[in-house]
Amino acid sequence: MRRGRSTAVLAMLIAGAIGVIASTQTWIDVTLDDGAQQTLAVPGADAVPVLTPLSLAALALGAALSIVGPVLRYVFGVLGILIAALVGIQTAQVLLATPVSATAATVTEATGISGTDAVASLVASLSLTPWPAVTLLAQVVLAAAAVFTLVTARRWVSGASRKYRTSAEAGGDAGRPHDAIDSWDDLSRGDDPTA
């Protein structure tokens, strides 16, 4: 089931890449009630602090999933579900409730005022960009890829494909006469064909 592995790997890589890209994009536009009506752009990494590291972890899972054995496939599937759940829950909170705490780091950096109540008193309005929704969709894709991995991992082809195996590993051509090329192959494996 070579396509199963490719599908899971590709989906995890795409979800992780979208998460990394989203962490650098503006998620929330905050207008401050400071007399100047200053507008600040809150990036995804400030709105959801775990977004960047966990998206990088999803990328690493996707890349490693292409080469690991059967046991680690299940481990990576569970890790993928956990990453999708953590990022997805925090993204959904920003998307549905738009808490002032998601903007606190950016507002504090711009104004020097800290504390949730003080920041909340400065915020006149909040508006979301499409990036939280895109990120939430990417987490759904990551979770689906992880579940797909858990369901199909047992049927994935293990090890090197047949075209990269030697004839001895593949159990091939035992009835054919031993020729000069086979002697070179024996030498490559460390066997002495003259013995």
Image (cartoon, rainbow, N blue to C red):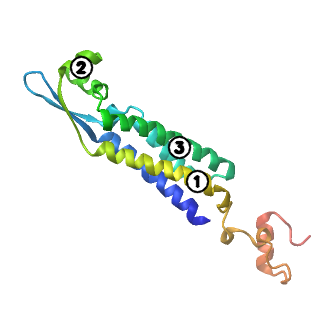
Say which residue appears at 52% left-offset and 55% top-offset.
9
Q: Kindly state the secondary structure of the residue where label 1 is placed.
A: helix
Spatial CA distance of label 1 from label 2 is 43 Å
Tell me the residue that label 2 is attached to. 119
Say which residue appears at 40% left-offset and 34% top-offset.
90
Label 1 vs 2, first from the N-terminus:
2
Within 10 Å of disc 3 (Cα), the crowding (few <14, some 14-19, many 20+) is: many
Spatial CA distance of label 3 from label 1 is 10 Å
Q: Kindly state the secondary structure of the residue where label 3 is placed.
A: helix
Tell me the residue that label 1 is attached to. 149
Say which residue appears at 66% left-offset and 72% top-offset.
163
* 124 horizontally vs 78: left or right: left
Quarter of the image with the N terminus is bottom right
* 178 horizontally vs 156: left or right: right
Q: Kindly state the secondary structure of the residue where label 2 is placed.
A: helix
Provide residue 47's location: percent of width, then percent of height.
32, 32
